[in-house]
Each structure stands twice: as C-alpha cells, then as structure tokens.
Image (cartoon, rainbow, N blue to C red):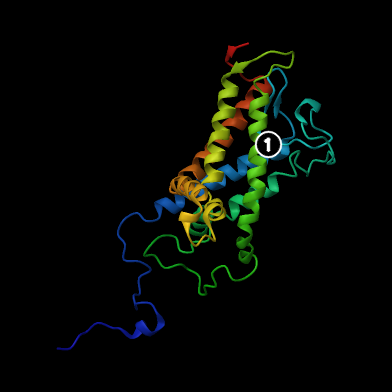
Amino acid sequence: MSSTTDTSGAANGRATIAARTLRTDRWWLPPLATFVALLAWVVYATVRAFMQQWYYVADYGYLTPFYSPCVSVGCVPEASHFGQFTPDVWWLPYAAISLPFLLLFRLTCYYYRKAYYRSFWLSPPACGVAEPHARYTGETRFPLVLQNAHRYFFYIAAIITLINTWDAIIAFGKPDGGFGLGLGNLILVANVVLLWGYTLSCHSCRSSVGGRLNHFSKHPVRYRMWTAVSKLNARHAQFAWATLVSLAVTDFYVMAVSAGWITDLRIVG
C-alpha cells in the first residue's frame, strides 16, 4: 500500500506544512494579553522610578518598594534607613542600588523568560505555532547567555526582600512613638508576603536548597526544606504575576497618600 503523505521534511526535523499553524483556537490571545500586561507594568514602574517624589509618607513611615532602599542624597532623611550616598540627578533612581538587580532577577527568571520570549519575541508565540525567526540559537549567545547568572541575582533579590520586610515592620512604629496600624501597613505586609512567595519559589532557590545531594536520607533538614520550596515552586508563575500586581498597588497607594489624594485608613493610632 502506498502513501501520499509527504515526509520529505522529516530529515529537517519539521513536517512540511505550509501553514504557520493548524490550530483553530484563539492561540494569539495569551501572548497578546501577556504583552499588554508586561508592557503596561514596565511603563508604570519606569515612570515611578524616575519621578523622585511621592514615595514616602512621613506621618506613618510608609516607603514604597520602588524606592527602597532610598540611598540618594535627594531622599527624605527619614526614608534613608541605609544612608545617602548616590547623587541626586534626574536620570538616576533613588533606589539605584536595588532596582537594577531586581530587574535582572525578573528578566532572567525561568517563568518570565517563557512569558516575554513568547509575547515579545514570538519565540514561539504558542505551542504548535511556528516562530517567525529563521534561526534558533537558544540561550547560547550574547546577551541571552547571561541568563545563566539568574542564581546570583536570586541571592541579591533575597537580600532586597529582607530590606522590604524591614520597611514593612518599622512602618508599624509611629514617628512620635507608639504603635500604629493602617491600611497602608496591611498593604505593605501583603506585598512582602507575596514577594517572599515569589523569591522562595524561584527555581534557583529550589536548586540551592536541595541541589547536589546524592542521598536525601542523609540530609533530612535540607530534604524538608526542599520539599517545602518545591511546593512553592509549583506556584511560581502565580507568584510572578501576583507580585507585579502587589508592587503596583503598594506603590500607587503610598503615592496617593503621600501626594494627598487620599487619606490612610487608620485602624490603630
């Protein structure tokens, strides 16, 4: 029995199908939605990072994570918990020592790679859809070869998350003494919890905790830690998106209170 199927493309590793895809669903919606969401967040975060105002609420000690740690000589002294040593110029964010590393941590994140490879580079835009690029070199060439540095950015991001945690804790103390609790405190704490979820669910964290072990039975503590991190790792994509939302909400709330657009809802003090 003879077959009329053309298999000449098998040697090239791909079936000889003229159409870019045989999918009939709206496969383009997820990458489009991701593109719009990521672009909107990047635009908002960039504008806020360079505004150099409305980042601190002196009455309640609220500091937006976009300006933490605030190390510019132009920072409000009360917001500069780690000193002031970078110049106050318009092109340098007040949190210049943290923002670049946080950006690199997310850019090299395994989930975000998938997200922006598909939505911005169309490489590929969806499963079963051919990418428009003629050549594919993976992450073997500059600048994508730098994705391998993700582990080191994770360590720095963990330190910065500790700083964000400290910001949230000290905000419970009123500038004139005593304890204070407002809606801003709850927002700051919720944001920190989500940031820890994203940081600890990172693939590099999972590898650091349980990697290079030949026998888990000989390392019961690390095995329990690896098991816990593995459970978080299964939700890494959700944490990735949740933290983008929480960061924007936290920053906007602090900005709105600092600018006087709204007043903080006080619960205690």
Neighbor class of circle 1 (other Cα within 10 Å; few <14, some 14-19, many 20+) is some
Q: Pick the quarter of the image with the C terminus.
A: top right
- Helix or strand or loop: what does disc 1 sit on? helix
* Residue that lies at the very extreme toward the top in this rendered image: 269
Q: Say whether residue 263 is visible.
A: no
Q: Please say if 229 is above or below 27.
A: above
Query: Can you tell which quarter of the image residue 261 is in?
Result: top right
Q: Please say if 21 is above or below 203.
A: below
* Residue that lies at the very extreme toward the bottom in this rendered image: 1
Q: Residue at x 83, y 38 (%)?
A: 88
Q: Pick the quarter of the image with the N terminus.
A: bottom left
146 sits left or right of 4 in the view? right
Q: Residue at x 45, y 51 (%)?
A: 32
104 sits left or right of 207 in the view? right
Which residue in the structure is indicated by mark 1? Answer: 163
Q: Say whether residue 179 is visible.
A: yes
> Residue 179, percent across and down?
65, 15
> Residue 105, percent across and down?
62, 51
- Amino acid beneath label 1: Ile
Q: Please say if 189 is above or below 236.
A: above
Residue 76 or residue 194, whichever sits in front:
194
> Residue 98, percent across and down?
71, 44
> Residue 52, percent across and down?
75, 34
Q: Residue at x 48, y 59 (%)?
A: 215
Q: Residue at x 54, y 34 (%)?
A: 193
**Number of numbered callouts drawn:** 1
Residue 42 or residue 62, whichever sits in front:
62
* Residue that lies at the very extreme toward the front in this rendered image: 218
